[in-house]
Image (cartoon, rainbow, N blue to C red):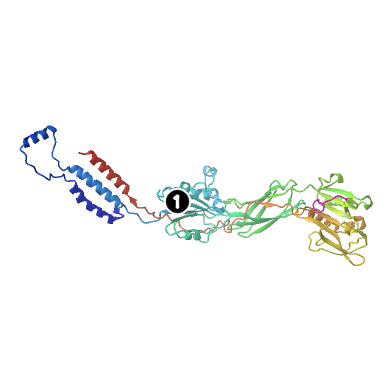
Amino acid sequence: MNFLDAYRLWWLLLVPVLVWLAQPPKPRVVTWTPHFDAVERALAARRLRPPRRSNLRLLLLLGACGAAVAAYGGLGVPAVPGPQRLVVLLDASASMSADDGAADDGAADAVTAAAPRRSRWQDATAQLRTTLAAVPEHVEVTVLRCGGDLLRRHGAFARQVRDLGEPGGAAAVDFVALAAQLPDDVAVCTVTDGQGQTSLPTRGALRVVGGAADNAAVLDVQLDDGWPLPELVAAIDLVAFTARAAEVQVRIDGDAVEPVAQAVTLQPTLPQRLTVPLARRAAGGALRVTVSLPGDPLAADDVWSCVLPPLPAPTIAVLADPEGGPYANVAAEALAAEVSGRVVAATDDATAGLLLVDGGQIELRPGIQRALCFGTRLAGRAAGEVLLEPRVTDWDRRDPLVADLDLSGLRVLVALPETLPDGAPFLFGAAPGGEPVPLAVVAGGGERCSLHFAFRLADSNLPLLPAFPQLLRRAFVRAYGTGASATAVRPALPAGEQDLRQPAAAPDRPLPPFGVPRRSWRGVCLWLALALLALRAWCR
């Protein structure tokens, strides 16, 4: 024990003063009287004693004074140097979800094999609870979940390692930098599996869970989605982090496609692409790509999933001018066969996937309704000047609608440029006088649009060109724009989280000895002083 403010002990100089004040008063005047006997008899009758000093009351007073001075001087037990705060850096990256409870090469018995597998996260949290249970109560404990969203737990929740969620964070963690940022008077404990780390912290305590293991992963999946057409091709990037070539099973399933299973042999650590055409279902839904490797402990990177939009209703409504010939109906039948659809009557255009119009006049909102119009005049718009035999000069070779198509043989007999609404031209021509005129435009964009040609099918040789079926197919796709696409569900994992063969390793280190704060006895001394004074008041 020592005194925090030892200089205040000079108040003990009051002890002689208290001893002096405790002396009984002496009579100041001595009076001689012939009535001494009478006074003695009176005192005896009242049983009074002459004043004298009480040693017990004096001791109680001195004890109370000493206790009060000790409290004023800061009597207590000195502090023990050392940290009094503990920060735990708990790894919650994706690799912490790996299972380490599998039997080794079938050596475990049936009871062990039937037992539930424990993940590295469960092992780490269990070890951490045991470690924190031995930490003194006066130590302030904080647990930081590192990887993904940073979570901080303090107090009882930190000591019980509760409410920390599950591992699977997609952010890389540098534990060496995190430990270096903490103050010097704070103890650090790092709990990790060493995955994705070039080195582990040399400061503070360290717990390393898990070990080396083989792992196969789906690195990425690229979909060549022909929406609104049913064409779908998956390019799957696979990798096996093994010591030798490994055979994995790849399965593609879900509500959106017909199931496909295939065995693939992967070379160690070398990414390999697998291209698989898929039979897409019209209703859309989830698509999952799963890779399986015997003994693979990490399931977080074994599955890639996305959501595919449903295919539009592949129905084509035809509205043709009776004088235009059979070209519109033949084109609709060819387009329906191309997109696996069907042709419906024009009266059902409200539910049609595409409206094909050849000639005549129609009430149509360009760019709002999906339509393919050939020489069709919109309601409220004059037909304008008729061009005879306009010459086709060029087409927009950068537009996917007509890119790589050969339209050099296109001949147009009659064109009505005034029937074209406002839009982006992609087919250009020239009047007999040489003036440039647009012969086809795309109105609208985004999720829906309409295509308009300035001539009827019967007034050109377009239906006879080899590029015409491909143009119809592209027009159907362009009418639906970019309104739907696949939505990936699983984010990519950080680099180093998938190769479980060589994690960063270091020997475990225990927690450092913690400091003990100074324990003051000031309150005890004050209560003792009050108790002694109360006892002195009771004594006579």
Element under disc 1: strand
Q: Which of 507/287 is in front?
A: 287
Disc 1 marks a residue whose amino acid type is Val
Q: Which of 98/101 is in front?
A: 98
User: Residue 483 magenta-drawn?
Assistant: no
Q: Which residue: 19% across, 47% down?
A: 21
Tell me the quarter of the picture where residue 225 sits.
Answer: bottom right
- Residue 215 lies, in percent from the top left, at 59, 54
Judged left or right of residue 30, residue 529 is right
Judged left or right of residue 246, residue 337 is right
Judged left or right of residue 2, residue 406 is right
Chief SS of the magenta region: loop
- Residue 298 lies, in percent from the top left, at 58, 51
Q: Which of 279/189 is in front?
A: 189
Does residue 186 appear in the picture of this structure? yes
Q: Which residues are magenta?
A: 362-370
**Residue located beneath label 1 in the image:** 141
Q: Quadrant of the C terminus?
A: top left
- Residue 351 lies, in percent from the top left, at 81, 45
